[in-house]
Amino acid sequence: MLVNTKYRSEDPEIMDDFAMEGEILRDALDKIAKINQLLGGNQLTLRGVQDLIGKISKTTEITIVDVGCGNGDMLRTLANFGLKHNLNFQLIGIDANAFTINHARKLSENYSNISYRCEDIFSQPFEELKYDIVLCTLTLHHFKDDEIIRLMTICNTNSRIGIVINDLHRNVLAYRLFQGLCFAFQLNAMSREDGLVSILRGFKKEEFVHFSEKLNLTNYKIQWKWAFRYQWIIKKDKEIKEIKRKDL
């Protein structure tokens, strides 16, 4: 089958149904988290957070929001890192699917600094939420371009320190490699279909540059990373300097 990656696909993913629940969804969430761990996705996002907080005192409380948190694996990774390095993290997971949020809560019962909220990121409660850092790990590709601009405008307005995006490179080789992963990890039909659609809804570097220009960003970097990911880090210089002054 010929794979066309010139433009972002607008095909829906099964997982985009916020009312979905059950064992198939739970299995998909956990398999996605496992694959993300093995391919270095969590570490990529973690390094983005380290980049943003590198010059901030360890005693400063830092609130981090994970948009589209899935089973909460990224938040638990951050909590473990914070505990190991004596960092004061307060972590919030956001997802519009109630079943997903309940699953994440069960998996995070031993983490007192992780909380979850079931809400639409285009709803008023999320638009009013304030935080230091916001993460989008394999979440941004779920949205159309105009929705991405709207979401990023909200995140840029409400974050004090910055934003870390970790998402898929729309690429034929990535598509073929994922087909191999489907067999190796024995992914269920939904995970296979959604994974391939996700890659076709992924990005090329020039699209992140276009978003940055539309958002009038001045301090950002876009880097290609293994495995077929882009890391897009946005820094809020003024706010970081104010935090540093408070720490002195």
Image (cartoon, helix red, strand yellow):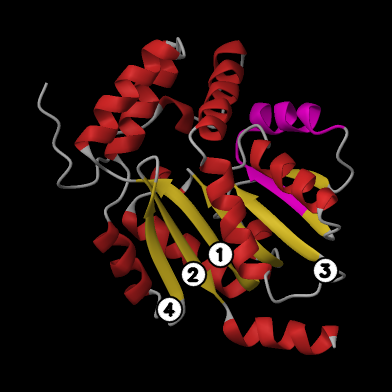
* Mark found first going from the N terminus, 2 or 1: 2
* Mark found first going from the N terminus, 3 or 1: 3
Residue located farthest toward the left when viewing the structure as drawn: 2
Is 157 left, or right, of 110 in this rendering? left
Above or below, comparing residue 169 to residue 13 in the picture = below
* Mark found first going from the N terminus, 4 or 1: 1
Of the two numbered discs 4 and 2 in the rendering, the one whose residue sits closer to the viewer:
4
Above or below, comparing residue 72 to residue 30 in the picture = below
The residue labelled by disc 1 is 163
Name which residue type carries label 2.
Thr
* Mark found first going from the N terminus, 4 or 2: 2
The residue labelled by disc 2 is 153
The residue labelled by disc 3 is 58
- Which quarter of the picture shows residue 21? top right
Magenta-drawn segment: 91-109
Q: In the rendered structure, does residue 96 fall within the stretch colored magenta?
A: yes
Gap in angstroms between the C-alphas marked 4 and 1? 11 Å
* Closer to us: 183 or 125: 183
Crowd rating for badge 4 (residues with CA inside 10 Å; few <14, some 14–19, many 20+)? some
Judged from the image, the secondary structure of the residue bearing numbered disc 3 is loop
Gap in angstroms between the C-alphas marked 4 and 3? 27 Å
Name which residue type carries label 4.
Leu
- Residue 56 visible in the shown view: yes
Q: In the rendered structure, does residue 129 fall within the stretch colored magenta?
A: no
The label number, if any, that marks residue 45 in the structure image: none
Crowd rating for badge 3 (residues with CA inside 10 Å; few <14, some 14–19, many 20+)? some
Gap in angstroms between the C-alphas marked 3 and 1? 19 Å
Q: Are marks 3 and 1 in contact (CB under 8 Å)?
A: no
Q: Quadrant of the N terminus?
A: top left
Q: Are marks 4 and 2 in contact (CB under 8 Å)?
A: no
Judged from the image, the secondary structure of the residue bearing numbered disc 2 is helix
Crowd rating for badge 1 (residues with CA inside 10 Å; few <14, some 14–19, many 20+)? many
